[in-house]
Image: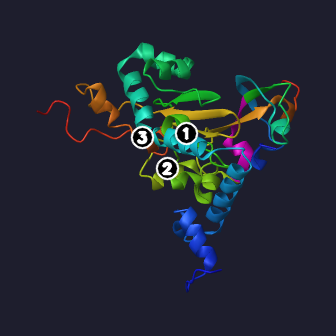
């Protein structure tokens, strides 16, 4: 819902844990937002998000706050 | 109707009861819709005029000066800087800045290696309880769409050029977290007072599109 389209399906890492907040999917429809959901700051490499469209520096990064239930785990390498 | 007049009755009544009516007729569609919703909320007892006025006054009392005070204090006090980075709300409380309107507040430190830039691609998330209303460009489609894909080009348009070896970190603010950038203290500011330092901290530098201003007069000059 509040996930920007350009990060959908992209691989990122958990940069920090913000804590738990009321679930916006419930709040948006007049619910109480409970149970609260963990919110993470998720980091991405700009070149992973935009591939060759990102013409600036390969070391540049981008961070988005995403709720746990909007994330999908990948096996650690 | 016993009284006579040569103008439209409705207009007359509205302006009698609502002095804003004349102004309201000049506003564009979305503004009119906002006023209509406001009136309905008041009519239905969801809000009162006083609630709305109080909120407007609260918002008007917030300004980038709050952010500038936080930054200037962090520049002069390492202890305060660490507090600002680890517990920004406690840091606000120390300076008497009310941060209670923020759910979660994160301060991003610019360094020689990292430059932070804040955007909200989905709407206009901004640390309003600290800084007040965001600038219009922050809400523009152009900024919101370009800041994430070509941040350095956007910053260049604000007159900011960063060395290639500095990592640009863009924060797309979308949920319950509000971000504030802690810009680097400019060179040649050793002799400046905290107030003079605060004057170098612009709103744009707190968003990250620019760095803090350089002092206009060298600190050593009399």
Q: Does residue B134 show up magenta in the picture?
A: no
Name the quadrant containing residue B179: top right
Between B187 and A53, the residue placed more toward the observer is B187
Residue, disc 1 = B128
**Mark 2 and mark 1: Cα distance apart in space:** 22 Å
Does dot 2 land on a helix, a strand or a loop? Answer: helix
Instruction: Tell me: B130 left or right of B149.
Output: left
Q: Which residues are magenta?
A: A41-52
Q: Where does label 3 land, which residue? A: B211
Q: Nearer the viewer, residue B155 or B56?
A: B56
Q: Nearer the viewer, mark 2 or mark 1?
A: 1
* Residue picked out by circle 2: B155
Is B122 on the left-hand or right-hand side of B198? Answer: right
Instruction: Tell me the chain of label 1.
Output: B
* Res. B208 in view: no
- Taking the image as shown, residue B21 lies to the left or right of residue A41, namely left
Please name the residue shown 64% across and 51% down the image.
B149
Say few, some or many: other residues with alpha carbon within 10 Å of mark 3 (under 14 / 14 to 19 / 20 or more): many
Callout 2: 10 Å neighbours few (<14), some, many (20+)? some
Q: Position of residue B92 (x, y in %)?
A: 49, 23
User: For residue B21, which quarter of the picture?
Assistant: bottom right
The first of marks 2 and 1 along the sequence is: 1
Furthest-left residue in this view: B222
Which is more N-terminal, label 3 or label 2?
2
Residue furthest to the top in view is B79
Above or below residue A25? Residue B1 is below
| Quarter of the image with the N terminus of chain B in it | bottom right
Residue at (33% x, 37% y) in the render = B200
The structure residue drawn at horizontal position 40% and vertical position 33%, both measured from the top left corner, is B68
Residue drawn at (61%, 54%), measured in percent from left and top? B146
Residue B152, image x and y in percent?
Answer: 53, 49
Location of residue A44 with respect to B6 vertically, above or below: above
């Amino acid at each position: 819902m509040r996930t920007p389209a350009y990060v959908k399906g992209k691989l990122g890492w958990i940069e920090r844990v913000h804590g738990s907040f009321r679930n916006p999917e419930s709040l948006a429809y007049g619910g109480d937002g409970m149970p609260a959901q963990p919110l993470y700051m998720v980091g991405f490499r700009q070149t992973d998000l935009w591939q060759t469209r990102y013409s600036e520096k390969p070391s540049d990064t981008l961070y988005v706050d995403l709720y746990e239930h909007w994330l999908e785990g990948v096996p650690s390498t | 109707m016993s009284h006579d007049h040569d103008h439209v009755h409705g207009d007359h009544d509205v302006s009698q009861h609502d002095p804003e009516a004349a102004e309201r007729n000049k506003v564009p569609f979305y503004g009119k819709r906002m006023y209509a919703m406001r009136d309905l909320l008041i009519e239905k007892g969801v809000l009162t005029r006083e609630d709305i006025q109080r909120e407007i006054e609260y918002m008007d009392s917030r300004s980038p000066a709050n952010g500038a005070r936080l930054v200037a204090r962090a520049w002069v006090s390492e202890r305060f800087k660490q507090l600002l980075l680890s517990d920004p709300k406690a840091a606000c409380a120390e300076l008497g800045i009310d941060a209670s309107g923020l759910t979660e507040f994160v301060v991003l430190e610019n360094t020689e290696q990292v430059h932070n830039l804040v955007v909200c691609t989905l709407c206009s998330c901004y640390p309003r309880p600290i800084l007040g209303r965001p600038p219009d460009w922050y809400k523009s489609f152009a900024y919101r769409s370009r800041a994430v894909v070509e941040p350095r080009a956007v910053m260049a348009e604000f007159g900011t050029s960063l060395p290639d070896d500095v990592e640009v970190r863009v924060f797309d603010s979308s949920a319950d977290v509000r971000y504030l950038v802690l810009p680097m203290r400019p060179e040649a500011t050793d002799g400046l007072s905290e107030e003079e330092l605060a004057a170098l901290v612009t709103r744009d530098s707190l968003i990250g599109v620019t760095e803090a201003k350089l002092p206009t007069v060298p600190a050593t000059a009399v």
